[in-house]
Image (cartoon, rainbow, N blue to C red):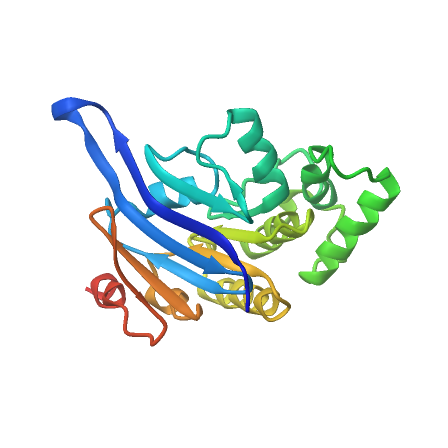
Amino acid sequence: MHKKVIDLNGITKVYGQDEAAVHALAGVDLQVKKGEFIAIMGPSGSGKSTLMNILGCLDRPTGGAYFLDGSDVSHMSKNELAQIRNQKLGFIFQSFNLLPRLSALSNVMLPMLYNPDEEISDSEAQERAIQALTAVGLEKRVNHHSNQLSGGQQQRVAIARALINRPPVILADEPTGNLDSISSVEIMEILHQLHKNGATIVMVTHEPDIAQHAERIVCVRDGKILSDRRDGKSPCLKMEKK
C-alpha cells in the first residue's frame, strides 16, 4: 500500500476580513499517494491557484491541516517552509523561472546550494546536475544560457532542476502553458517517464488534452473540490472545452 505524501484536511483560505472577506478555499480535503499523477483543473477564480500555493508551501492555510510527506506544514515559519520547499518539493513553472545569467548546469545545481542537510562536494553536485540534464535530453546543452535555448529546452532545464534534490513530490504549474504543441508533447512525455519511474506529480492545467495525461483529475470550483475522478469524465474537462 502506497503511503500518502499529501494529506489535506479541511483546508480553508480567507483573504481580507469581515464584509471584504474572500473565501478562496472552503474546506478542501485531498489525499495524494506516493507515485500518483494527478491534474488539478478549474475555471478562473475557482481556487486552484490558491490550492497550488498551499500545496507548494508558498502560502499558509487559514484553517485545516496539511501534512506533506508526514510533516504537518500548516503552521510552520517562513524559514521552515523554505527548507521544506527545497527538500520535499520540485517546482516546474509555466514561465520556467530560470536565471538568465547562469548556464543550464548552474540553474540545475541551484537547489543543492540551499540544501544544508545534504553535504555534497562541488564535483558531486555538478555530476548529479549533468545526470539530470542528460535524463531530459540536454546533455549537449549544459553550458548554454536560457537565451540560447528554445522554450521546450528551457522547460526541460526546469524539470531537471525540479528533480535535483530527489523530492517526494513534483508540482507542475501549467507546465506547457508557454509552449507550442510539439514542445508540449515532448514535456508531457518526460513527465510520463518520471511518473513511470515512481515520481509523484501534481499538475495544474486548464488544457483538457494535457489534463488527460494524468491518471486522476481533481476539479475545483468555488473553493471546493467538485469532483475527483479516474475515469476521464471530469466535469472540468467539459467546462474548459466551452
Q: As rendered, which of 227 and 171 lies closer to the eye?
A: 227
Look at the picture and state if 184 lies above or below 76: below
Residue for point 40% across, 45% down: 52
Horizontal side, residue 53 vs residue 198: left or right: left
Look at the picture and state if 225 lies above or below 83: below
- From where the camera sits, is residue 37 visible? yes
Residue for point 71% across, 55% down: 133
Q: Residue furthest bottom?
A: 231
x and y percent of residue 60 in the render?
Answer: 40, 33
x and y percent of residue 101 in the render?
Answer: 67, 33
Horizontal side, residue 31 vs residue 121: left or right: left
Horizontal side, residue 18 vs residue 142: left or right: left
Residue for point 57% across, 46% down: 89
Q: As rendered, which of 69 and 140 lies closer to the eye?
A: 69
The C terminus sits in image quarter: bottom left
Q: As rendered, which of 238 and 25 lies closer to the eye?
A: 25
Q: Count up the numbered dots.
A: 0
- From where the camera sits, is residue 140 visible? no
Horizontal side, residue 12 vs residue 17: left or right: right
x and y percent of residue 130 in the render?
Answer: 78, 52
The N terminus sits in image quarter: bottom right
x and y percent of residue 160 in the render?
Answer: 65, 52
